[in-house]
Structures are given as structure tokens and as C-alpha cells.
Amino acid sequence: MPGNFVQLFASIVSSQHHLPYQNVYNEFVRVFGKPQPVPIEFANYMKQILFSFPPNFGPSFQYYPLAAWTIVFLALRWTLLLLGLSQVIAWLLSIFLGVYLALHKNKFLDRAMQPALYFLNSIPGFWLALMFIFVFALELKVLPPGQAYSVNPTPYSVFIHMILPLSVIILTSIPSHVLVIRSAAIDVIGSDFVAATKAQGLSNRRLIIRVMRNSLIPSLTQMFLSVGYLIGGIITIEYAFSYPGMGTIIAQAVMIEDFPVMQAAFYVITVVVLLSNLAADLVYPLIDPRVSYAE
Amino acid sequence: MTATPSTTTRRGILHGIRSGNGFASILLRTVLKRRDVKVGLGILIFFVALDIVSVFYLPYNPRAPVSLGGVNPAPPSAKFWFGTTDIGQDVFSQWMYGTQATLLVGFLAALLTAVLGITTGIVAGYINTWDEPLMRAADVILTLPALPLLIVVASFYKTTDYTVALLIAFLAWAGMSRTLRSAVLSLKHQAFVEVAELSNVPRWKIMFVDMFKHTLPLILTYSLFAVGGAILTVASLDFIGVGPVTDYSWGSMISLANDASALLDHPSAWWWPIPPGLSIAILVTGLALIAYGLEAAFKNM
């Protein structure tokens, strides 16, 4: 940040609430400590993040006494719920669709689905969210337009509110899964063991199950590795639905320049992405015995 | 197994280079026969034409409230083809005008991504000592969640079309770099490279002329995906409210419509967010069709 951030923020607060500038400034210094030279401040900042649990990003400006970490952590539950549920459903649907398209390569449905999938992949998720709100919540009035629950978080209310955001996330993440599984399945179908299976005279159903199992491997790792990209899509969709997850928190923090919350949010997202990358590496040898990390 | 082009292809390429035709023209002839590429090019040409027209002619001033006296937002009519916004701006003019910023950011970001990706990828593949440092840097960039990072950075520093393109390129080069590196690694031991090395062709010329020519289809495919990715990223930034603040683009139109609760009002002003959103989807689809077509044509060559 160029300039002195405390002075800037104190002047904003003092002009908004008609308070004397010096009082506001003194109060800031009392709460956040006296400004130190930048290297020392940075060392303190890193110390508070890395060597305390939970990481201390300081209090949020917007919800003042609450720690930025608490706000982000509460929001993270909703985001992880959406991420987990949507990816399980999207992935299961994609397996069937991808393998079906690979088995019927260059037939009518396969040819028609490809441009359709490219188109679905190209729709901005938040725009699709706005259209869903318009059609299902405002015109047909069958589902609520936003938020995670109405008054109390009862299971039914949470479920009803989740349908729209979840279906938008599923629709926007299906194309990449299907394209990966389809090309993996085409490779598997062309391999020797499938020819051997056919020569053994195994039933079609058994053959399809074998093809499916072997096409899962690349798509599963791809799913774990694309979590960073997926979260990027999910936060804009959450913001469109005012869903109380990371997206809404980040957008609100950006709007009123709540820097501790923004830093905490980015920190948490990075940790989630790193963990999922690690998971991809750890899961790989479990599902594919040909891979091992032993020397 | 290395990806070696078949003998006939190699002969074709050599012939093309000798006759001054170049690899690109051979590729072009193969690619232009595909229907998906034709459709994709049609879409791209339409939007580029719209961009050029909007520089010289717009029906109304896209910034000024032009529909005064009357209900705003107003539905599409003969006078205002796509209706008007809540303060009486013409949506059709804004949509035409927004093409400029959207295409500028998309293509500029892709160009910068390509420059970074080509340089690092070819250098890492061709010069052994640079391989490790460049690829570890690429790994770091690949783990970063791009959009959340961009949101945080863009909220500290107010971005323009140019700086946002630079930021996107900085977070997007790694994938291209890796792909190019592995292509260069397999090209490195082919006869034509060895001949060039033995006949004292300077190193930079082998890297940035020969290697560049032979990875051109990859570069083109990747750059086209980069254009689409950059357009979607900038639209997301606009939607969150940290996009380039300088001008109207398709993303900022959707964002403004959302901020004005255009859809929540009764009756909903659906004509306002639909044109920019649909245009993004169609344009990015067009780019993807060209890119996948190019990829498939190259595989079959």
C-alpha cells in the first residue's frame, strides 16, 4: 500500500462519522499498535501468521472486534460444502457421460455434445447464476434467489437454498471433467487389455465397467489439481447468490477495503489448494498401482 | 516414445520451408477445411468487425444517459435495440463499445502470456542449466489460485486494461511454458537440429526460429485458450468489483446490472445483462472451436 494506511483509514472513518481526526487516529494506534518501520512490521506480520494458531490476521475492520480469521473460517464451511458436493455429483455424472461418448465416438450424440460442452465451458459462471436466479427464483418462483437459509439453518431450508448455486457449479464444472474422461476412455478402449477382454468374450457390461475404472485415474488427479481454478469460479457464483461463503466475504471485504479479511481469505484458499495438490499426489499411487514413490 | 512427425509430414515441412511457404501455410490449408474452425473463425471475425465498427460509429454515446423522459430501464424497442439501463444509457451502444475493452484485454493478455511462455518454455527445454530454475518457478505459479490472488492484488492497486492483462499473463504463462518445454525436449535430438548445431547456426536462432516454427501449432492452440481464459477472468474481476475501472466492458456491464438489481426489479430488466454475458460465452466458444480444431488437425497431419 502506498502512503500511510492508518492515516488514510482514520481520515475515512473520521469524515464518515464526523469525529475529530486526532481522536480516531489515537484510537487506531491504541488498537493496532504504534506504526513501526516496514521491515519490522513485516516480520511481526509473518510471525503472527506462521507461529500462532489460528493464524492471527488481526481484527476485521468491518466487524471490528471479531478476528478476520473467524469470519473467514465460518465462510469456509459453506464454500467447502458447495465444493465437495458439487464435485462429487459433477464427477459421477461426467464418468457416465464421458465413457458413453467415448464408446460412441463420432456418433451423432458425441459430435453434438462437443460444441455444447465447449459452450457450457465458456459461459461465465456468475452470469449463469444470474440467469438461474432470474428464471427459477423470479419468474417461476420455485426456489429462493439467494442466501444459505431463510431464518434458521434447518436441513430443509439449507437444502432448498443450495439447489440453485449447486446446479450452476455442477453445470460449469461438468465440461472439463467430461472432456478429460472422454479422451482417457478413448485411450483405454484402444489399449491391448480391452482387446483381450473382448477376445475373452466378457459381457459388454463388464467391459464398460473395466473401461470406466481405468478412465477414472487421470480425471481424479485432474479434479484435485483444478481445485484452485474451481474455487475461483465458486467465489463469483457465491457472490451472485449472496451465499455466505468465501466469495461473498471477499467481495464485501474488497468493497469496504477490509484488508485483514482479504489477506486471511487468500491465505485460507491457498492452504486449501496446496492440501488438494498434496492429496492428488497421495491418492495417485492408491488408485494406480503402477505409480509408486518408493525409491 | 517421442512425438516424431511421419516421414511424409517431415518431407512436407522441409519442402514448405525450402519453397518459402513455411510451416504455417501448410497448417492453414489443413485447418481451414474443418467445419469447427470455420464456425469459430466466423464468430471471431464477427466480434472483431464489431470492435472495428464501434471505433468509428456508435448509435449513441455509451456513457451518457440518452433516453430521457420515460421509464428506465426500458425494454428493447426500435429506437434502443437492446433496451436501456437504469439511468437511460443505450445497452446496444454499450455492448458494441464494450467489445473494445474486452477484446483488448483478452488478446493483450494472451500475447504477453505467449511471450513469457515461449521464452521460458523454449529456453528451459533447450538449455539444460535453465531447466530446473524455470520449471520450479512454473510449478509455484501453477499452484497459485489465480482468481483469488488477482482479486486481492486488484483491490490494493486499482488496475487498468493494460496492468490487468499483465497480471493475468504473469499467472498464466506456466502451463504454456511446460507444454512447450516438453515439445522442445523431444525436438532437440532430431536430425535437423543436429545439422543446424553442426553447421554453426547461432543458438538463439535455433531456439527462437527453428523451435518456434516447429511448435507453432502448439503455441497457437495455447494462445487461443489464453485469450478465452483472460476474457473470463477479467469478467469475473469486473463482477466482484475490482476490474479495470477505466472503461465499460462486457464484464462491467454485467456487474453494473447486478449492482442496480436489474433482474430483481419488477419487471426484470433482463435485456441489460443478457447481451454481454451471452457475447462472452459465444466469443469464448468460438476461440475454443478454433483451438480444438487446430489441435485435432495437427494431430492428424
Image (cartoon, coloured by chain):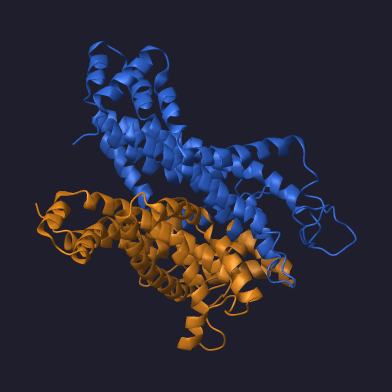
Chain colours: A orange, B blue
Task: State the image quarter where residue B59 is shown.
Answer: top right
For the point 10% across and 55% down, the residue is A294
Q: Looking at the image, which residue sits at the far top?
A: B199
Task: State the image quarter where residue B117 is shown.
Answer: top left
Q: In the rendered image of this protein, does residue A104 appear above or below residue B194?
A: below
Is residue A187 in sight in this rendering?
Answer: yes
In the image, B127: left or right of B258? left
Q: Percent x, y for residue B261?
A: 69, 68
Q: Percent x, y for residue B176?
A: 38, 40
In the image, B107: left or right of A117? right
For the point 48% across and 39% down, the residue is B35
In the image, B41: left or right of B253? left
Q: In the rendered image of this protein, does residue B272 appear above or below residue A17?
A: above
Q: Looking at the image, which residue sits at the far right?
A: B69
Q: Percent x, y for residue A187?
A: 25, 49
Number of on-image labels: 0
Q: Percent x, y for residue A247?
A: 51, 66
Depth check: give the residue in front, B155 or A1: B155
Depth check: give the residue in front, A26 or A246: A246
For the point 17% across and 64% down, the residue is A203
For the point 30% across and 44% down, the residue is B136
Depth check: give the residue in front, B123 or B263: B263
Is residue A50 in sight in this rendering?
Answer: no
Q: In the rendered image of this protein, does residue A128 appear above or below residue B183?
A: below
Task: State the image quarter where residue A84 is shown.
Answer: bottom left
